[in-house]
């Protein structure tokens, strides 16, 4: 029920049913509680402020009585007196401040230099060991290359090599130009001139290399420019490089060069005039020489795809066949060829005859009247293999006869050598 003014006709009640007083629905008690809480907070804050002020006062008293504070106060007074003295002499105190800051910076730098100087002997020893290991690695590579080339020359009997240490200045020049990011028309003469000065054999080459590497590490190229007679513009370009790039330049080494000569196929002896440089040979001669290198390099299995390409019959007979016969004792060789003379004269141990059926190469097969299917593969003595080779090779049956005669001659020679070795008296103990 409501009064004419719209207010409730009855007073609201508390949750437990007790009616609220008419003095603002219990707001008086709430205000009293808030007042008490505010007063308590004020007392606590005042107490905390008084405690903090007391602690701060004790700290300031202790600091004022400490030796550190006395030194700080004395230093401040001395600084003020010194500034007054400078002003009396007509000097700028601000300039004094700058000088003092510079002194502090120089002191810091001096301390850093002293620390680095203490570590310098160890760094120098580490650097020397690294350069020694670096040079040893290149020396080992040179020795291994020489051993490889000597082994190929001995096994092939038709190749010989000349290995020149650090003579490939062209590749060194390209790498240096790439590191310096030079334009195609920039410093066209300076880089090759530096390469020639560094890597051309000379009595003082070790000294030249040391001078170049030291200049790259330190950035001081004055002595190098004078010794090598290099233009200042080129040296300034190198001097302005990042230190890491200069260090990379110092580690660049000119590679070795290899010159290969081959024995002409018609050579009857090893006279010097019978040898020719690989670059002076015809395309077929170069192919034959490189094939000989591949055959006698390493001992892992080797697959050759049509080694007779670009070669005439003389080269196939005098080089390819002969080299295959020599190399097959040291490695397994698989040859894909259209020339049947190669498997016959090179004494292939197994021949697989392929034919193109339109769906790609497949092994040739024969279907017997009994329905059995036989593949045309096996040794040269296999009838089906022999017939296939006779149909496509030059010489036909005569080639097999020549092979049989040669095989018997080689076998007789081997047996005679073996017999002599068995009859040789043992060396006295």
Image (cartoon, rainbow, N blue to C red):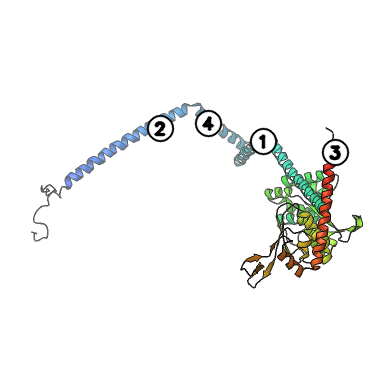
Q: How many angstroms separate mark 4 from mark 2 (CA)?
A: 19 Å
- Structural crowding at the residue carrying mark 1, measured as other residues with C-alpha within 10 Å and reported as few (<14), some (14–19) or many (≥20): few
- Structural crowding at the residue carrying mark 4, measured as other residues with C-alpha within 10 Å and reported as few (<14), some (14–19) or many (≥20): few
Residue at numbered disc 1:
119
Secondary structure under the numbered disc 1 in the rendered image: helix
Instruction: Name the N-terminal-most of marks 1 and 4.
Output: 4
Which residue appears at 25% of the width and 39% of the height? 39
- Structural crowding at the residue carrying mark 3, measured as other residues with C-alpha within 10 Å and reported as few (<14), some (14–19) or many (≥20): few
Rendered-image quadrant of the N terminus: bottom left
Residue closest to the eye, 5 or 142: 142
Q: Marks 1 and 2: in contact by CB < 8 Å?
A: no
Q: In which quarter of the view is residue 118 placed?
A: top right
Q: Would you say residue 161 is visible in this rendering?
A: no
Q: How many angstroms separate mark 3 from mark 4 (CA)?
A: 105 Å
Residue at numbered disc 4:
72
Secondary structure under the numbered disc 3 in the rendered image: loop
The residue sitting at the front extreme is 370
Q: Marks 3 and 1: in contact by CB < 8 Å?
A: no
Residue at numbered disc 2:
56
Name the spot of residue 99 as percent of width and height, x first. 63, 39
Instruction: Name the N-terminal-most of marks 1 and 3.
Output: 1
Name the spot of residue 58 as percent of width and height, x first. 41, 29
- Between disc 1 and disc 3, the foreground one is 3
Instruction: Name the N-terminal-most of marks 2 and 1.
Output: 2
Instruction: Name the N-terminal-most of marks 2 and 3.
Output: 2
Q: How many angstroms separate mark 2 from mark 3 (CA)?
A: 112 Å
């Amino acid at each position: 029920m409501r009064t004419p003014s719209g207010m409730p006709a009855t007073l609201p009640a508390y949750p437990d049913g007790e009616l609220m007083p008419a003095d603002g629905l219990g707001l008086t008690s709430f205000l009293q509680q808030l007042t008490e809480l505010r007063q308590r907070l004020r007392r606590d804050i005042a107490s905390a402020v008084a405690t903090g002020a007391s602690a701060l006062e004790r700290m300031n008293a202790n600091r004022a009585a400490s030796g550190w504070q006395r030194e700080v106060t004395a230093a401040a007074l001395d600084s003020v007196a010194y500034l007054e003295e400078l002003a009396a002499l007509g000097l700028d105190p601000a300039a004094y401040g700058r000088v003092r800051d510079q002194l502090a910076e120089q002191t810091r730098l001096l301390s850093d230099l002293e620390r680095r100087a203490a570590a310098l002997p160890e760094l120098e020893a580490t650097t020397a060991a690294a350069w020694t290991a670096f040079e040893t690695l290149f020396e080992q590579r040179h020795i291994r290359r020489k051993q490889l080339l000597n082994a190929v020359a001995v096994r092939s009997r038709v190749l010989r090599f000349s290995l020149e240490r650090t003579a490939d200045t062209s590749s060194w020049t390209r790498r240096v130009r790439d590191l310096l990011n030079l334009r195609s028309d920039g410093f066209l003469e300076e880089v090759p001139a530096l390469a020639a000065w560094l890597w051309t054999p000379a009595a003082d080459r070790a000294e030249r290399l040391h001078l170049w590497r030291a200049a790259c590490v330190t950035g001081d190229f004055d002595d190098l420019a004078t010794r090598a007679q290099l233009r200042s513009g080129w040296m300034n370009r190198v001097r302005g490089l990042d230190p890491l790039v200069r260090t990379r330049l110092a580690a660049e080494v000119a590679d070795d060069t290899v010159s290969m000569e081959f024995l002409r196929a018609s050579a009857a002896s090893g006279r010097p005039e019978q040898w020719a440089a690989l670059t002076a040979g015809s395309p077929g001669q170069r192919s034959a020489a490189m094939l000989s290198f591949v055959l006698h390099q390493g001992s892992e299995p080797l697959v050759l795809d049509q080694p007779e390409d670009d070669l005439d019959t003389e080269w196939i007979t005098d080089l390819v066949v002969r080299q295959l016969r020599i190399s097959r004792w040291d490695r397994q060789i698989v040859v894909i060829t259209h020339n049947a003379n190669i498997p016959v004269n090179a004494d292939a141990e197994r021949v697989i005859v392929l034919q193109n059926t339109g769906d790609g190469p497949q092994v040739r097969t024969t279907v017997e009247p009994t329905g059995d299917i036989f593949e045309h593969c096996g040794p040269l003595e296999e009838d089906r293999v022999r017939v296939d080779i006779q149909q496509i090779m030059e010489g036909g049956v005569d080639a097999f006869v020549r092979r049989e005669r040669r095989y018997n001659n080689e076998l007789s020679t081997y047996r005679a050598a073996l017999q002599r070795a068995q009859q040789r008296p043992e060396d006295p103990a």
